[in-house]
Image (tube, grey):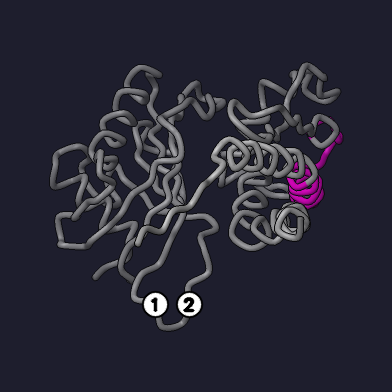
Amino acid sequence: MRVTMDVNFSRFHKKCEATISKVARSTYAATEEACEDIMEESLRQVPRDTETLANSAFYDIQKAKDYGYEATLGYGGSAINPKTGTPVMDYAVIVHEDLEAIHPVGKAKFLEDPIRDYASEKFSRTVIKHVGPVLESENNE
Amino acid sequence: MNDLLLDLINHLASKGIVEGDGIDSFRDFTPEEPDSVFVIHEYAGAPTPLHDTFTHRSLQLTFRDKKASVAKAKCKQIFDELSTADRYKVLSNGRWCQIYPRQSPFKIKVDSAGRTTYGFNIGITTERD
């Protein structure tokens, strides 16, 4: 007796590709939410005097090389601090990394700390929130 | 087991990279003198579960000198000593560590006395103090 099974790999591959593509698209929303949350917390921690540094906060979401999206978050640019005449890009790193500077408002590591906290506590939940429903709907098809 | 920061300074001293704690190496503060100093700062690490034997901590290692080239070279020397390819490091007193450099050495600042500080940040998983 022989048992045989026909598998249509072409259809299987197409289904996989379609699912990967849908998941990749849903990661945009997850990436955007992560950026918003991190920047919100970062702006609570950034040292503020003239607001030049805080106003230079940005994030930029790009398509990743393979699937999905990646983001760059930061502070910088050519805006000039009115007190010192220095562009933000020339002092943002110092303010971020100088752990001994005393700031009446805010603190050093105002971007790194929120990113680390988010990565360890919230990021997986954000991904599940956005990608989970997509996988669920694929599973039900 | 001593304080981690002291263990790291003692390890680097045993390799002849720095002189020693309180001489040219300091923990969590940078003195005005001497000009040439190595400083380790600890900043926010991961919360430690109550019964875990290991902790994950964040450190910033900096080297300041009158000459930017010296600060850079010393910082690179410290970086090379602590960042092994497999991340695994046993310090001179036997403390076990896994060290993850978060970037290579970079220029942090030039102070009002013209001294340049280079530094880098690491994540370090190690035994509790």
User: In terms of secondary structure, where does tag 2 sit?
Assistant: loop
Q: Is residue B73 left or right of residue B28?
A: left
Q: Which residue is mark 1?
A: B52
Check the residue under mark 2 and report the chain it is in.
B
The picture places residue B86, in percent across and down from the top left corner, at 25, 44
Q: Is residue A109 left or right of residue B54?
A: right
Check the residue under mark 1 and report the chain it is in.
B
The picture places residue A115, in percent across and down from the top left corner, at 64, 49
What's under tag 1, amino acid-wise?
Answer: Asp
For residue A10, above or below residue B44: above
The quadrant where residue B16 appears:
top left
The picture places residue A127, in percent across and down from the top left corner, at 70, 54
Of the numbered discs in the image, which one, if any, rests on residue B49? 2
Q: Are marks 2 and 1 on the same chain?
A: yes
What's under tag 2, amino acid-wise?
Answer: Pro
Q: Which residues are magenta?
A: A30-53
What's the residue at 32%, 21% (across, down)? B70
Helix, strand or loop: magenta stretch = helix
Quadrant, the N terminus of chain B: bottom left
Find out whether residue A33 is within the magenta segment.
yes
What's the residue at 30%, 23% (across, down)? B73
Front residue of A115/A71: it is A71
Do callouts 2 and 1 mark residues in contact (Cβ within 8 Å)? yes
Find out whether residue A56 is within the magenta segment.
no
Instruction: For marks 2 and 1, give the CA distance.
Output: 5 Å
Front residue of A101/B45: it is B45
What's the residue at 81%, 42% (across, down)? A48
The quadrant where residue B67 appears:
top left
What's the residue at 41%, 38% (across, down)? B62
Front residue of B58/B49: it is B49
